Image (spheres, rainbow, N blue to C red):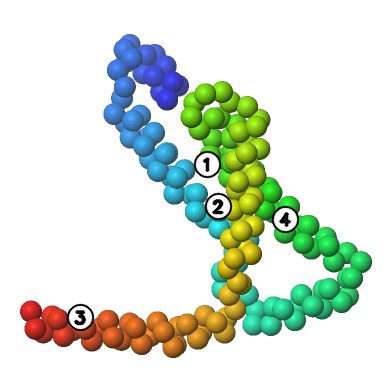
């Protein structure tokens, strides 16, 4: 924002804020905030529907074949959580700045980092991983009948009113 004011002083000869600069700042803030949930989803390691139906069998094969380095797979998962939490803290939570505006410091960064790590681990341990069969059951047994009921109810209400 200060650079926009300096340019305004240089080009226009006054410190009056340009409406275009204010719009650019607003668009930048909206863009940064809109990237928060995708960044959190990536930090959690959510893979969407790209899972194979026999994912557990693949993991057991890795465990059997590479029994000596089994812990490295999980260390990689947790390193991903730590790095994702660091990036989320820096980019979206103000880094080492105090949320109350008191005094900045590395302790605020560590506190925010630990809270994010605890939240990510809590979410990963609470919700089970979805399999393609679970999603198919949800779709065929719950969502399609619900959508057909919604369609019939809407058509009936349109016909009546």
Sequence-wise first label, 2 or 4: 2
Decide if residue 156 is in sight here: yes
Would you say 71 lies left or right of 99 here?
right
SS assignment at label 2:
helix
Q: Earlier in the sequence, mark 1 or mark 2?
A: 2
What is the quadrant of residue 3 in the picture?
Answer: top left
Q: Any mark on residue 78, and which?
A: 4
Looking at the figure, which quarter contains the N terminus?
top left
Classed neighbour count for the residue bearing mark 2: other residues with Cα under 10 Å, few (<14), some (14–19), many (≥20): some
* Mark in front: 2 vs 4: 4
Outermost residue, right side? 68
Is disc 4 placed on a helix, strand or loop? Answer: helix
Q: At 62% from the left edge and 39% from the top edge, which residue is drawn?
A: 111
Residue 60 drawn at (x, y percent): 79, 78
Q: Which of marks 4 and 3 is nearer the N terminus?
A: 4
Residue on which the image places disc 1: 92
Q: Mark 2 points at which residue?
A: 39
Depicted 142 relative to depicted 36: above or below: below
Label 4 and label 1: CA atoms lie apart by: 20 Å
Disc 2 to disc 4, C-alpha distance: 16 Å
Question: Is label 1 in contact with label 2 (beta carbons under 8 Å)?
Answer: yes
Rendering coords of residue 86 (x, y %): 64, 43
* Residue 120 at x, y percent in the picture: 61, 55
| Distance from Cα at disc 3 to Cα at disc 2 | 37 Å
> Which residue, given by chain and number where applicable, does mark 3 sit on?
154
Give the vertical position of 57 relative to 112 (above or below): below
């Amino acid at each position: 924002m200060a650079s926009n004011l300096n340019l305004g002083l240089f080009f226009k000869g006054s410190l009056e804020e340009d409406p275009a600069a204010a719009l650019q700042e607003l668009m930048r803030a909206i863009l940064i905030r809109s990237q928060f949930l995708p960044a959190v989803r990536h930090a959690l390691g959510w893979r969407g529907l790209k899972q194979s139906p026999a994912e557990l069998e693949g993991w057991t094969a890795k465990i059997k074949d590479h029994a000596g380095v089994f812990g490295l797979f999980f260390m990689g998962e947790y390193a991903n959580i730590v790095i994702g939490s660091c990036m989320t803290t820096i980019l979206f939570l103000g880094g080492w700045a105090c949320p109350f505006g008191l005094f900045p410091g590395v302790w605020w960064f560590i506190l925010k980092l630990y809270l994010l790590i605890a939240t990510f681990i809590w979410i990963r341990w609470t919700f089970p991983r979805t399999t393609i069969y679970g999603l198919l059951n949800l779709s065929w047994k719950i969502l399609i009948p619900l959508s057909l009921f919604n369609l019939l109810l809407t058509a009936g209400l349109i016909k009546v009113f």
